[in-house]
Image (cartoon, helix red, strand yellow):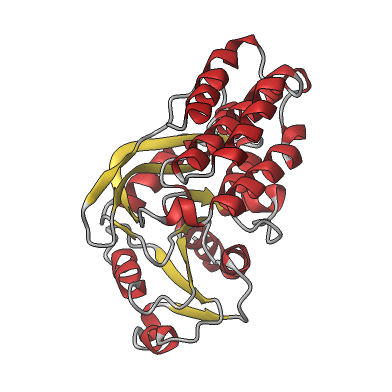
Amino acid sequence: MPAHTATKTASNEMVSVVIPAYNAAGWVARAIDSALAQTYPHREILVVDDGSSDATPRILQGYGDAIRSLRQPNGGLSCARNLGIQQARGGFVAFLDADDYWLPEKLERQVECLRADARIGFCSTRTRVVSPEGESMGSWDCPVRESTLLHTLFLRHASVAGSGSSVLVRRELFERAGLFDSELRSLEDIDMWMRLAALTDYACIDQPLTVIVKSPASMSGNLDVMRSSALQIMHKNRALLPAADRGRFWQAAYAGMLADYAKWEIRAGRRPAAIRHLLEAFLRAPLARWKLTLGILYDALRGK
């Protein structure tokens, strides 16, 4: 085999692991160690230090040549992931947030999945959700799809199990889908999965090979930012849907999204905002959703 062919083959087989890190000194080593412990041997680990002011740079330096450490001024999660994609040498790109970690067979199983079917452009795995203390908070399961993944994502944004810490993508797809949207303040991963789902198929490995560490208070603390970003991605990606689904289907999906955030607003004690958003959902919702919307609205008005 000619040398250039062998080099190209090796590059195509390689997984570039992108780990964004911002002031992650307390946990980034666990993420890196889980990437280094993968049974899949053809990998590189790129840790993007997003302008950390803590001990993160010193910890990364301690890994020497085992990782590629990149540093940039603080630009946010999307900018950090984008730098990793741009610097990646592998034919596959895997994402892992600095506070999460993987089980050893994760990459091997995912590469096998993509190798087995050229129609699949990205995949993730069933995911364990744990507290910072390591206590189980449930499972993020593989999605049940009514039709395409794109339609499923419009109906349920969190359909890609594990999301930004679980997904493996064929790198060539970013040339068509573009990079992560740095203008979004949240849900930039959902936006990317929508764009990828419009181009290619997706698979989910039904084994808990990804572990996400989640604080119970994280939703309420970011509720306004998440809701604003959800509105943005629903509007900006509407054109990805087939023309026939940009009317009634999109309105139903939009109403469902409003109702979901209203439920979280009720739990956070923000009933006036929840009632406003439920009324908007009711006006948008077709007949199939009016019972659900009115049920939530009734509970909000009763103060439940």
Q: Nearer the viewer, residue 259 or 108?
A: 259
**Outermost residue, front direction?**
302
Q: Nearer the viewer, residue 56 or 13?
A: 56
Q: Is residue 165 left or right of residue 230?
A: left
Q: Position of residue 45 (x, y in %)?
A: 43, 70
Q: Nearer the viewer, residue 224 or 181?
A: 224
Any part of residue 62 in sight: yes
Q: Position of residue 215 (x, y in %)?
A: 36, 57
Q: Nearer the viewer, residue 163 or 34?
A: 163
Any part of residue 187 in sight: no
Where is 67 relative to 169, above or below? Answer: below
Number of marks drawn = 0
Q: Is residue 255 left or right of residue 268?
A: right
Q: Position of residue 125 (x, y in %)?
A: 37, 43
Q: Residue at x 60, y 32 (%)?
A: 275
Instruction: Place residue 83 in its image quadrant.
Output: bottom right
Q: Position of residue 274 (x, y in %)?
A: 58, 37
Q: Is residue 110 left or right of residue 48?
A: left
Q: Is residue 304 left or right of residue 82?
A: left
Instruction: Place residue 65 in its image quadrant.
Output: bottom left
Q: Residue at x 49, y 86 (%)?
A: 53
Screen quadrant of the C terminus: top left
Where is 183 relative to 156, above or below? Answer: below
